[in-house]
Image: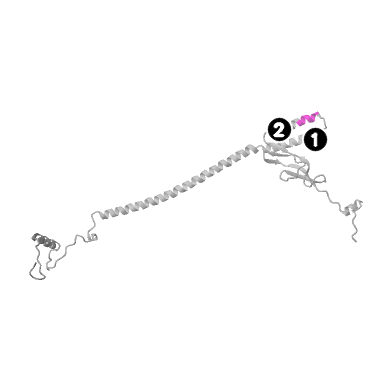
Amino acid sequence: MPDEKGVFTADIPASAVAAAVAAVEKGRAPAEPGGEQVATPDAESPRRQEAPPEGAEAALDEIDELRAELEMSQEGSRKLYEQLREEHDRLLRTAADLENYKKRAARERDEIQRYGNERLVKEILPVLDALDRALAAAPAGDQLAGGVAMTRRLLEEALARFGVKAFSAKGERFDPRVHEALMSMATSEYLPGMVVEEQQRGFFLHDRLIRPAAVVVSAAPAVVTEAEAEADGEAPPSRGDNG
């Protein structure tokens, strides 16, 4: 133990003391002429105080150029996409127009095939009407009427092969879509609005009406009034005495 209070001694090697002194001296800067010490920059000072490495500015310029090229490329890609989309829409419209044209051409071709002979048929129908009138006027048992009937039948069969068919309207209710009323006849034998006579047959070409049937339509009998009955010399209908 030491002989005096507050005093202690330690055995420190001389080499350790020399190393500590050298470390302290190393951290000091050389003395300036005024005798002041200038501290040397610490090795751990912030990196912002260091000078930028060589070639950093060139790298930044290259990055800016690459960024500009990327933006130009993206803008070009957007424009190209818009052009491709417009071209795609145009091609779709063209394809739709072509498909519609094909369908319309097919319909027109089918219509020509089905109804292309309509004018010719209308020119032949009066011949059938003349044959019908000849048969109606021929006396019973007339041999010539037999030949006319055969000719009429052959002509109708030939027209039927091209889709022409006749229809009769007598006894049916008047239909303005397929009947043409020539006159009306007051009668009690038929209900009003019925076909009582057929002056001319109607014809269809496939499903198209090419000639309506010319008919006479029934009408209700006229009501005889008292004045008309007295004028004709008939007794008016009796009435009960009211008073």
- In the depicted view, which residue is nearer to us: 177 or 29? 29
Q: Residue at x 74, y 31 (%)?
A: 151
Q: Is residue 218 left or right of residue 45?
A: right
Q: Residue at x 79, y 34 (%)?
A: 135
**Residue 169 sits above or below residue 64 on the image:** above
- In the depicted view, which residue is nearer to us: 115 or 7? 7
Queried whether the magenta region covers residue 37, the answer comes back as no
Q: Quadrant of the N terminus?
A: bottom left
In the picture, the disc for residue 84 is none
**Dot 1: element:** helix
Outermost residue on the front side: it is 1
Q: Is residue 210 left or right of residue 9?
A: right
Q: Residues within 10 Å of mark 1 (few under 14, many from 20)?
A: few
Q: Which residue is mark 2?
A: 157
Q: Which residue is mark 1?
A: 136
Where are the magenta residues, as a range? 143-149
**Dot 2: element:** helix
